[in-house]
Image: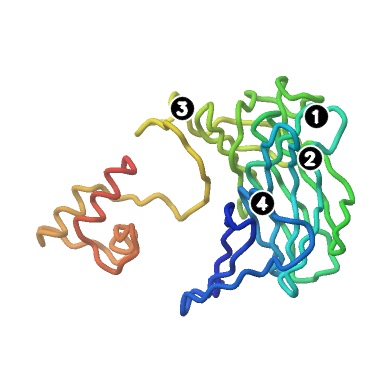
Amino acid sequence: DGDYAVVADADLHRLIAVDLDDGDRLGFDAFGDPLNEPRTLAVEDHDNVLVSLQRDDPDFPFAATQRVYSIDGYTETLITHPTSGDLESDKGPLGLFVESDDNILTYDDILACFGEFPAILRFQVNSFGAVIDHEVVSAGSNFDGDDRGSGPNFLSLIDLVLSEEDEIFALDTNLPGVFEVDPDDGDRIIRASNTVGEGPAFTEPRVLCLGRVVPDFTPLDVARHLTDEVPLSSVKEEQADINDDGVVDITDIVFMVNLGL
């Protein structure tokens, strides 16, 4: 609901909670397993934080997914990667997404995407920090283990998210582009790439989120609106305010042009 933000700081090796009202900061990973080189995180519904770690020291490589408890800052390692003998890599996930609910006694489903395998895995973790089960959700013929699902191979996954309709969308930095993945059978479809769809080409995509409906106006519509040539409907005006500053102006046109709208 936006009361605070959580930041993983790789240099401090800790999490920092940020009060969004006054900017006050609190480091709340106080003890337990050290947070070495965090690189992505996800917040559970009951405010515990899951963090993906990757230490690339050739002498002491370490990859894990850890939980930091918001009530006392205690940090524990939930998953050490690799988790299965057929995954010949010590690399951890680059993207995490957690499904949980307000009942702390229920299990969390953690979706994790990996760049080196590459694949999407699901981990089931209980509130006491125990991994109940894990499975491969989707992987092609270039996966270290058995492939699952049909469609083009992942190349190097870097982020993922679950939609309200329970479809998985995954960002591949080497494709580059966006996959849609069926969470039940693992089937893969390329939804956008430099050869699928129109608009600016991907060059080095890093982060994926789902947002509101793509606006159905053009920069010319907004330009005419700015010169009082034509009014915009309230819906279109809200959509046209693409940077959400309460004003429809030239900045919004710049944003739209950069987005290829």
Name the amino acid type tagged 2: His
Of residues 116 and 119, the one drawn nearer to the viewer in this rendering: 116
Residue corresponding to mark 1: 87
Residue found 50% across the figure and 40% down from its top: 206
In the rendered image of this protein, does residue 75 appear above or below residue 110?
Answer: below
**Which SS class for mark 1?**
loop
Report the residue that reaches farthest toward the top: 141
Task: Say above or below: 90 vs 100.
Answer: above
Relative side of 227 to 171, left or right? left
Q: Earlier in the sequence, mark 3 or mark 1?
A: 1
User: Which amino acid is tagged 1?
Assistant: Leu
Q: Which residue is mark 3?
A: 196
Task: Please give left or right for residue 30 compared with residue 25 in the image.
Answer: right
Q: Which residue is mark 2?
A: 81
Is there CB contact under 8 Å for labels 1 and 2?
yes
Precedes in sequence: disc 4 or disc 1: 1
C-beta proximity under 8 Å, tags 3 and 1: no
The residue that mark 4 highlights is 97
The residue sitting at 81% across, 53% down in the picture is 78
Image depth: mark 4 or mark 3 in front: 4
Mark 4: which amino acid? Phe
Closer to the eye: label 3 or 1:
1
Label whose residue precedes the other's in the sequence (4 or 2): 2
How far from the left and from the top, in percent, is residue 247?
25, 66
